[in-house]
Amino acid sequence: MGFFDSIRNFKNQLDQIETSVYSGKQSLLEVYERNLKLEAEIAARTKELDTANRQMLTLQHVWDMMNSSKPLSSVLNAIARSLQGELGYLNTCISKKMCDEKGDYLQLVSFSGELFGTSFIKFFKCEPTDLRLEFPKIPNIAQAIEENTVYQSTNIAEFIKSALPKVPDIIINGVVSHLRAKSYIMVPLAHKNQHFGCLVLFSSREDTTESELKFLNLFARQIELAITIADLFEMVKEQAITDAMTTLYNRRYFEEALMKEVIRAKRQDQKFTVIGIDLDYLKNINDIYGHNYGDIAIKAIADVLKTSCRSIDIPARMGGEEFNVILPGVDSQGGVIFAERIRKKIESISLEKIGNITASIGVATYIEHSEEVYELMELVDHAMYESKRNGRNRVTLAKAVNDTSWQEIAITTFLDILSKHRIPVDKKTSNLLIEKLQEMNINNEILYQVSDTLISTYNPEHISGGTRKKILLATLLAKRFDLPKENIDKLKIAILLYDIGNTMLPKELLQKKEPLSEDDKTFIKKHPVIAAREILEPISTIVDIIPIIEKHHENWNGTGYPNNIAGENIPLESQIILIVDSYFALLENRPYRHAMTKEEAINVIMQDSNSKWSANLANMFMTVIQEDYSD
């Protein structure tokens, strides 16, 4: 190979190497450029994923709030905080459509961020929630609200001017100049196909992405769902504590409020007064004009209470034509003044067809009349019924508790029976009951427990708390017949004691599954006499209660026992015991039958009208069960 051939060969090799290096360089450059694109795409996807995660987190917060049973205001505040904190908006606010005598307007109900910072208070001289915002007048904004679509703009001054048309431009421009926000997004909100308000977000960016607007549109629908659910929770809560007919508080809420007021009164050593109001002659109104007019009369009293009570007072419909009002911080003198004002307002009402209506009112004050809540309510009831007995349409102030109450008589009687072993109760049970009865802070519940325990010794199927329920139902019935307080007290004691003679009967007889023989029936029929004469007669404090107990198994048609007396010869208290005892017995299991439902038991009660009890008593029982009694 010649010299020149060697040079050419070397050059060719150099060209190959250069071509190879160039080709490698191009490949490396392409890889580098592809890596740059990939990194940019990864960054974009990561950003999108981060945004999506924050959006999902915000939606999750909304869903959590939707299931929290919290008030609507709390739900909206949480939504505003989530948007501002998690999605990075500078400020978020939610306005709600309101209405007053001047017409419709928007009011800020929740916001997050400083909402324009200190410049807001500096320029507008008020808090954001104090502003009355006009409905937006700018065509684009108005159209977005009408079409329920998201609207975005960089003209923030335009938005403020639309909501606050009376504010001078110089002030609006001053506010906008202090803002970090470059644009705003307005999302209309609807509820029940009606405009509810607007969600407004202020952003540090001038532009928004299509996905962001789509998300906000989706988010708005979730807010609307949250509003609907919160609204339903509020409605259900309201229904749970209010009376459907009058929209006053119901018995349940009143009783809870009463216990809270007792705790507060004890802590602050402050009196409070309870007044009881009973519409006069409701039965006559219903009989003459129909129940619709009776309802109108009841609503009229409710309206008087709504306009007369303070914001801290608790007016409630207890059932039927009865109302109670708690007056915190009011003594008996103030209670009587308030009650008299109520009475006069009711008396001045003239209703179509019915004419004027009146009410009987009772007043009792915590601490002044009693420091026991159950006793206070009894005093209110007794004072109210004294008003009825003395001619109606009047106010009666309760009297202080007598030196010897019906509870004390019942305690003394039980202690006598148990300590002197007048009934066959085992020693352990007897000592336990005596210990309960000797507690310093005796109350009705202990009396009920003692009675229930004694009943369960011969009737294992006895409903827990049955004595309390019987006394409540019997008392409501007695009040319907305008029985005086002394008679109602005797009735309560009689209910505690009337079946005590059963403890003297053989258990195998009381729990016998097969039909009773005539001898069995004769033996069982002796229990009222046993209770009255052998067990109770030696106890001098209940001499006038014994006839009630002795006759509580006499039937209206004369087929009862032990003396086959009939009709009006049977004390009303004895008749009440019989019908109440029969009702609760039907609700309990027996060896020979299963427990009945309430509806079945009521049907049996009504079928025995004019046989076991008078039709009048049966009808009144039905009325009390439907209108007054709640177990």
Image (spheres, helix red, strand yellow):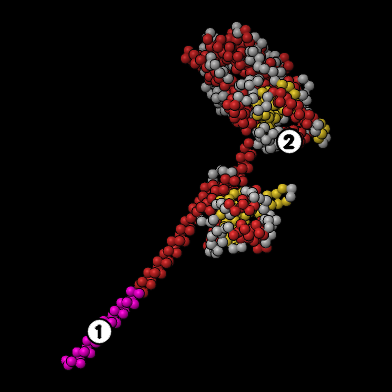
* Residue beneath disc 2: 307
Is residue 502 depicted above or below 630 in this figure?
Answer: above
Is residue 14 depicted above or below 59 in this figure?
Answer: below
Which badge, 1 or 2, is on the more N-terminal residue? 1
Q: Quadrant of the N terminus?
A: bottom left
Secondary structure beneath label 2? helix
Horizontal side, residue 273 vs residue 39: left or right: right
**Residue under the point 51% across and 56% down:** 88
Q: Which mark is residue 562?
A: none
Image: magenta residue range: 1-29
- Is the stretch drawn in magenta largely helix, strand or loop? helix
**Residue under the point 54% across and 16% down:** 440
Q: Position of residue 472 (x, y in %)?
A: 63, 24
Secondary structure beneath label 1? helix
Q: Is residue 80 visible?
A: no
- Amino acid type at circle 2 is Thr
Q: Are marks 1 and 2 in contact (CB under 8 Å)?
A: no
Count up the numbered dots: 2
- Amino acid type at circle 1 is Leu
Residue 156 highlighted magenta (yes or no): no
**Residue under the point 47% across and 61% down:** 48
Is residue 277 depicted above or below 143 in this figure?
Answer: above
Q: Quadrant of the C terminus?
A: top right
Q: Position of residue 509 (x, y in %)?
A: 54, 17
* Residue beneath disc 1: 14
| Nearer to the camera, 407 or 196 | 196
| Nearer to the camera, 198 or 178 | 178
Q: Is residue 130 visible?
A: yes
